[in-house]
Image (tube, rainbow, N blue to C red):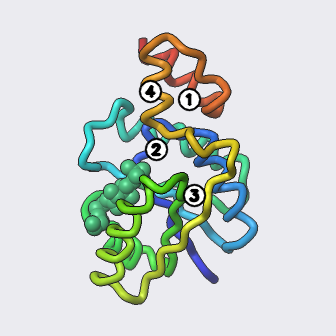
Amino acid sequence: MIKAVYPGSFDPPTLGHVNILQRISPIFEKIIVAVAVNPAKTPLFSVEERIYMMKEIAKNFNNVEVDHFSGLLVEYVKKIGAKVVIRGLRELSDFEFEFRMALANRSLAPEIETMFLMTDPAYSFVSSSVVKEIKALGGDISKYVPDVVLEVWKRKK
Ligand code: PNS
């Protein structure tokens, strides 16, 4: 059984993340969405909120589970017996960060492969940061995020 880990901050999840899940769900037997507890950036949503949102999204798939991790990603991936890390790539600016991270992870744990999916063009500019900026400036974000994100955001106020 090939288990894949889809790690991220998911602060908040976007329809771009959902699109990646839709595309990897038929490829792997099991996908573990791994919500990062301690990313370098300070998240807007608590880890509980991010896990809740991802769990609601995961209900649409029969092979997606949600967990959280702290510390090194590769240690978490080894601990749960997965072999593959999935990352989405949007534009060239993602590439440098992703390339460095994949090489660092490969150096730490050569048995784990990072696989990249190119974004669906419809979501090429959709990121958690863009969504947060649009929302902070009073824009409508309903085109970019799943309903559960709108619901959690409403409760935050
Ligand atoms: O959604 P993001 O913020 O792009 O996700 C980045 C994340 C959390 C996957 C990445 O920062 C990560 O794996 N952090 C854990 C620490 C680690 O293992 N770093 C890799 C060595 S450089």
| Nearest to N terminus: mark 4 or mark 1 | 4
Give the Cα distance between marks 4 and 2.
12 Å
In what element is the residue under mark 2?
loop
Q: Mark 1 sits on what residue?
A: 149
User: In the image, what residue type sits under mark 2?
Assistant: Phe
The C terminus lies in quadrant: top left
Write the residue at 24% across / 48% down. Answer: 40
Query: Disc 4, ligand 1: is the CB inside 8 Å?
Result: no
Q: Nearer the viewer, mark 4 or mark 3?
A: 4
| Nearest to N terminus: mark 3 or mark 2 | 2
User: In the image, what residue type sits under mark 1?
Assistant: Val
Q: Residues within 10 Å of mark 1 (few under 14, many from 20)?
A: many
Mark 4 near mark 3, Cβ–Cβ under 8 Å?
Answer: no
Q: Mark 2 sits on what residue?
A: 10
- The quarter holding residue 55 reads top right
Give the Cα distance between marks 4 and 3.
25 Å
Write the residue at 32% across / 49% down. Answer: 37
* Front-most of residues 153 and 107: 107
| Nearest to N terminus: mark 4 or mark 2 | 2
Query: What residue occupies the far front of the structure in this picture?
Result: 92
| Nearest to N terminus: mark 4 or mark 3 | 3
Write the residue at 35% across / 81% down. Answer: 106
Query: Disc 1, ligand 1: is the CB inside 8 Å?
Result: no
Q: Which mark is residue 65?
A: 3
User: In the image, what residue type sits under mark 3?
Assistant: Glu
Q: Mark 4 sits on what residue?
A: 132
Can residue 69 be spotted in the picture?
Answer: no
* Rendered location of residue 18, percent (x, y): 64, 47
